[in-house]
């Protein structure tokens, strides 16, 4: 297994420090590894993510916020990895922020890819607690906001987006960013008792589904179906951004819900089916969920979407297959890039 195949540029490692965090910080590389093992990913259908540049980030973030990330203390607080406080910032940049910027670049690229061919999955991203001038909850860059703004500004015919946020936590980052933006419809389904409990941001949610501790598959999946259908019937967007956090998994130390691996796979299927039935392009990001078994579940879910014929070259009828993949693949080897969108 080469470094490239293990997707090192998405993973966060620092001399074992990452083990102090309640996270499987290598989950992104493992998902790619499993998908390659199953031969779902080949060199021909994976796009290498490019690190988001400062210019890219400034489309959403303030200069003031980006400057604050030059302080290790700030990054330690945002990422909740206290030992980072003691590291010089150049190491924090290289070991933590660069992988997060690469994942952010992956979400931006996957947005274009989704619109081009009907679907795209960034095996990373989903930093839904970060807004233009505030990070938190492990989220340092607002990749969802960025992907949507890039599409609005740079792709003709994209003027309405729906965010379906099914991570166990409230997505207060994109909610703050789109608080007064009528082009974006936000559906958010989360454990009502956990972080961040951001009442101000909740005003941006058009379809709010608050769950109780220990919610199980049957109730959960009924709600996913009812509300994702309802949200898409209410407003027909030009693109869907699906924040597919897996911290809803039973046993997650932070999420407090009790969804089975099979329930997660079914959930993703429901959302992709709702998008495909309407012919709306969908971009999925993987967001929270860092148990040891999480990577396997994400890979299994992506394989299931493929088996169900919900992703593949013909995911949206009438669309061309993957011209954008070809385009991106024609610029290989750029520094700091690696993986992501499949
Ligand atoms: Zn979460």
Image (cartoon, rainbow, N blue to C red):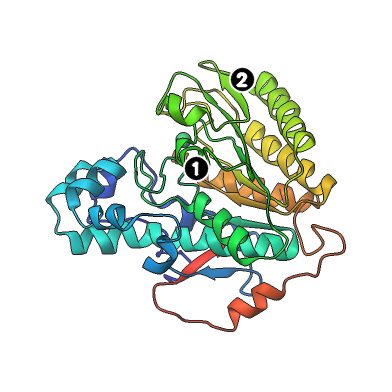
- Judge whether residue 320 can be spotted in this image: yes
Rendered image quadrant of residue 60: bottom left
Image side of residue 169 versus residue 153, left or right: left
Q: Quadrant of the C terminus?
A: bottom right
Image side of residue 226 versus residue 190, left or right: right
* Separation (CA) of disc 1 from disc 2: 27 Å
Q: Position of residue 112 (x, y in %)?
A: 63, 64
Which residue matches tag 2?
Answer: 216
Say which residue appears at 52% left-offset and 26% top-offset: 250
Residue closer to the observer: 106 or 70: 70
Image side of residue 248 versus residue 194, left or right: right
Q: Position of residue 147 (x, y in %)?
A: 55, 56
Q: In terms of sequence position, does the residue under pointer 1 or pointer 2 come before the other?
A: 1
Dot 1 crowding, Cα within 10 Å, few <14, some 14–19, many 20+: many
Residue closer to the observer: 103 or 151: 151
Say which residue appears at 53% left-offset and 54% top-offset: 31
Query: Where 140 falls versus 340 (above or below)?
Result: above
Rendered image quadrant of residue 301: top right
Say which residue appears at 69% left-offset and 29% top-offset: 224
- Judge whether residue 37 can be spotted in this image: no
* Disc number placed over residue 174 in the picture, else none: 1
- Element type at marker 2? loop
Residue closer to the observer: 99 or 113: 113
Dot 2 crowding, Cα within 10 Å, few <14, some 14–19, many 20+: some
Q: Position of residue 325 (x, y in %)?
A: 65, 73
Q: Position of residue 324 (x, y in %)?
A: 67, 73
Query: Where 296 falls versus 206 (above or below)?
Result: below
- Element type at marker 1? helix
Among all residues in the image, which is located at the extreme right?
A: 318
Mark 2 residue CB less than 8 A from any atom of ligand 1: no
């Amino acid at each position: 297994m080469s470094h490239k195949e293990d997707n090192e540029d998405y993973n966060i490692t620092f001399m074992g420090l990452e083990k102090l965090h309640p996270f499987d910080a290598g989950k992104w590389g493992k998902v790619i590894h499993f998908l390659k093992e199953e031969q779902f990913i080949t060199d021909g259908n994976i796009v290498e993510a490019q690190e988001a540049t400062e210019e890219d980030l400034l489309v959403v973030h303030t200069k003031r916020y980006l400057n604050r990330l030059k302080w290790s203390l700030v990054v330690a607080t945002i990422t909740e990895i206290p030992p980072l406080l003691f590291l010089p910032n150049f190491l924090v940049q290289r070991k933590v922020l660069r992988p997060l910027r690469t994942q952010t670049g992956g979400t931006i690229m996957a947005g274009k890819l989704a619109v081009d061919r009907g679907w795209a999955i960034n095996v990373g991203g989903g930093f839904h607690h970060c807004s233009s001038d505030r990070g938190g909850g492990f989220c340092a860059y607002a990749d969802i906001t960025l992907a949507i703004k890039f599409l609005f500004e740079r792709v003709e015919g994209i003027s309405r987006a729906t965010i379906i946020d099914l991570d166990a936590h409230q997505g207060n980052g994109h909610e703050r960013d789109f608080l007064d933006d009528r082009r974006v419809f936000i559906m958010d389904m989360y454990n009502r008792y956990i972080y961040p409990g951001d009442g101000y941001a909740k005003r941006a949610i058009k379809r709010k589904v608050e769950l109780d501790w220990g919610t199980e598959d049957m109730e959960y999946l009924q709600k996913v179906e009812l509300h994702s259908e309802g949200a898409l019937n209410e407003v027909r967007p030009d693109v869907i951004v699906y924040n597919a956090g897996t911290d809803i998994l039973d046993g997650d130390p932070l999420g407090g819900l009790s969804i089975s691996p099979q329930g997660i796979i079914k959930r993703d299927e429901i959302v992709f089916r709702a998008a495909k039935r309407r012919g709306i392009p969908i971009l999925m990001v993987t967001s929270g969920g860092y148990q040891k078994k999480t990577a396997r579940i994400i890979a299994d879910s992506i394989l299931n979407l493929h088996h169900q014929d919900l992703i593949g070259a013909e995911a949206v009828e009438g669309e061309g297959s993957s011209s954008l993949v070809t385009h991106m693949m024609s610029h290989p080897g750029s520094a700091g890039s690696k993986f992501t969108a499949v």
